[in-house]
Amino acid sequence: MVQSVFYWFPRIEPRGVLVVEDIQPIHEANPFRTQFLPQIMKDLHFCGDPKQQRDELCFPSLFPLLASIHCEMHICIFERNDHPAKELSLDKSTPPKNALDLKQCKSMLNGHW
């Protein structure tokens, strides 16, 4: 699921959507729901005063392309913004090490929200 987001999302045309299904609470989907989604949601709402507290994005390659995320029941829809689609190398389409471990993203640690 995460690999699909990192591979396909940058390639989707502006204002297009990526639908991720079957994210119900089952063993196969739990890492996506409990590790990836909280990080991408935090990035979506990335804000604050850098003078008070420095914050970092969990997924800087996805954030500039993200317009919205809609999740209902067992489906999440990721909407692209107006930036043009990109054809990335396979290396740049690979999820970072923190994708399924939110403890590796600094902005997810205590005191950063």
Image: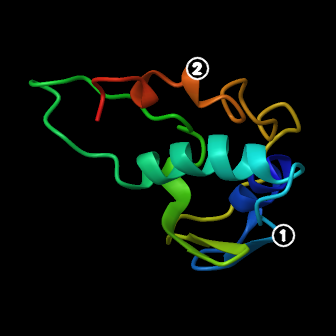
Q: How many labels does the image show?
A: 2
Could you classify mark 2 by the number of other residues whose Cα lies within 10 Å: few (under 14), some (14-19), or many (20 or more)?
A: some
Disc 2 and disc 1 in contact, CB within 8 angstroms: no
- Closer to the observer: label 2 or label 1? 1
Of residues 10 and 33, the one nearer the viewer is 33
Q: Can residue 6 be seen in this view?
A: no
* Residue at left offset 69%, top offset 35%: 99
Q: Where, quadrant-wise, is the C terminus in this rendering? A: top left
Location of residue 48 with respect to 8 vertically, above or below: above
Q: Where, quadrant-wise, is the N terminus in this rendering? A: bottom right
Residue 75, position as x, y percentages in the image: 71, 75
Q: The residue under label 2 is which amino acid type?
A: Gln
* Residue at left offset 25%, top offset 45%: 47
* Residue at left offset 73%, top offset 74%: 74
Can you identify the residue that label 1 sits on? Answer: 22
Quarter of the image where one finds residue 98: top right
SS under mark 2: helix
Tell me, what colour scheme is on the image?
rainbow
The reply, left or right, for residue 32 in relation to residue 66 is: right
Task: Please identify the residue farthest to the left as the structure is shown.
Answer: 51
The reply, left or right, for residue 8 in relation to residue 107 is: right
Can you identify the residue that label 2 sits on? Answer: 104
The reply, left or right, for residue 26 in relation to residue 62 is: right
The reply, left or right, for residue 29 in relation to residue 66 is: right
Of residues 105 and 10, the one nearer the viewer is 105
Residue 108, position as x, y percentages in the image: 44, 30
The earlier-in-sequence mark between 2 and 1 is 1
Location of residue 109 with respect to 82 vertically, above or below: above
SS under mark 1: loop
